[in-house]
Image (cartoon, rainbow, N blue to C red):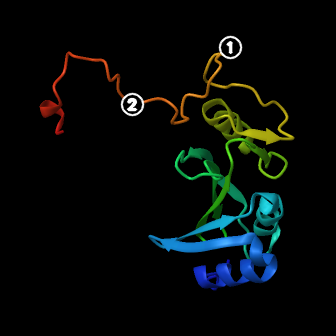
């Protein structure tokens, strides 16, 4: 077990190893948030997992996200990784255009990614290239949309049965 792996060391080693593939690094509540280029995500995750110093051997979570106002980077995937040996957690983010929702699968690195990637596909339409069984997991197969994309208004503007003053507006 290593007590020497701190956020500053992780950041400097990632930048040294991957250079401009590391787009930005921030720290919030003691956890690194690292935005990386989509093209390098497999290489970066593999290095974080296989490095004897880093040892991020557990994919805690993987989820999609949609920011419709970020032109050219409307969709994204967040990978939460955990190093049990170092008692460290990090978040990796990739961002990409909704017109090209393809991301390489990490199921070959972490078997737990299988269902998480299927969920991100089901709800956001993110297509994980190389996934062994990419199909809907919670919604019906014949759905023609992805329900967590922010494409529809939250409220029906034609409703007359409620008054805004009761909802803090």
Image disc number at residue 96: none
On screen, residue 129 above or below 79: above
Q: Nearer the viewer, mark 2 or mark 1?
A: 2
Q: Can you say which quadrant of the picture contains the C terminus?
A: top left
Tell me residue 97's x, y (percent): 69, 48
Residue nearest the observer in this picture, 96 or 111:
96
Q: Are marks 2 and 1 in contact (CB under 8 Å)?
A: no
Task: Give the left or right position of residue 18, taking residue 72 as reference.
Answer: right
In the figure, residue 168 lies in which quadrant? top left
Chain-order first, disc 2 or disc 1 = 1
Tell me residue 158's x, y (percent): 31, 18
Tell me residue 36's x, y (percent): 70, 65
In whole angstroms, how far apart are the C-alphas of marks 2 and 1?
A: 23 Å
Pointer 1: what residue? Answer: 142
On screen, residue 131 above or below 42: above
The residue positioned 66% from the left and 26% from the top of the image is 137
Tell me residue 126's x, y (percent): 70, 39
The residue positioned 64% from the left and 53% from the top of the image is 73
Residue nearest the observer in this picture, 53 or 42:
42
The residue positioned 16% from the left and 25% from the top of the image is 163
Kind of element beneath mark 2 = loop
On screen, residue 90 above or below 62: below
Residue nearest the observer in this picture, 118 or 82:
118
Residue nearest the observer in this picture, 145 or 40:
145
The residue positioned 70% from the left and 34% from the top of the image is 118
Kind of element beneath mark 1 = loop
In the figure, residue 122 lies in which quadrant? top right
Circle 1 Cα neighbour tier, 10 Å, few/some/many (<14 / 14–19 / ≥20): few
In the figure, residue 22 lies in which quadrant? bottom right
Pointer 2: what residue? Answer: 154
């Amino acid at each position: 077990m290593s007590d020497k792996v701190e956020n500053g060391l992780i950041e400097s080693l990632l930048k040294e190893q991957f250079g401009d593939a590391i787009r930005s690094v921030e720290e919030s509540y003691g956890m690194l948030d690292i935005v990386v280029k989509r093209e390098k995500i497999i290489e970066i995750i593999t290095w974080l997992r296989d490095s004897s110093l880093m040892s991020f051997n557990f994919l805690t979570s993987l989820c999609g996200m949609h920011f419709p106002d970020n032109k050219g980077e409307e969709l994204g995937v967040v990978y939460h990784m955990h190093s049990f040996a170092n008692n460290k957690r990090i978040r990796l983010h990739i961002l990409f255009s909704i017109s090209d929702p393809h991301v390489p699968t990490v199921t070959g690195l972490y078997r737990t990614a299988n269902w998480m990637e299927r969920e991100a596909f089901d709800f956001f339409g993110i297509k994980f290239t190389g996934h062994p069984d990419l199909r809907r997991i919670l919604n019906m197969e014949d759905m023609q949309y992805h329900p967590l994309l922010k494409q529809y208004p939250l409220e029906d503007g034609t409703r007359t049965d409620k008054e805004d003053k009761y909802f803090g507006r």
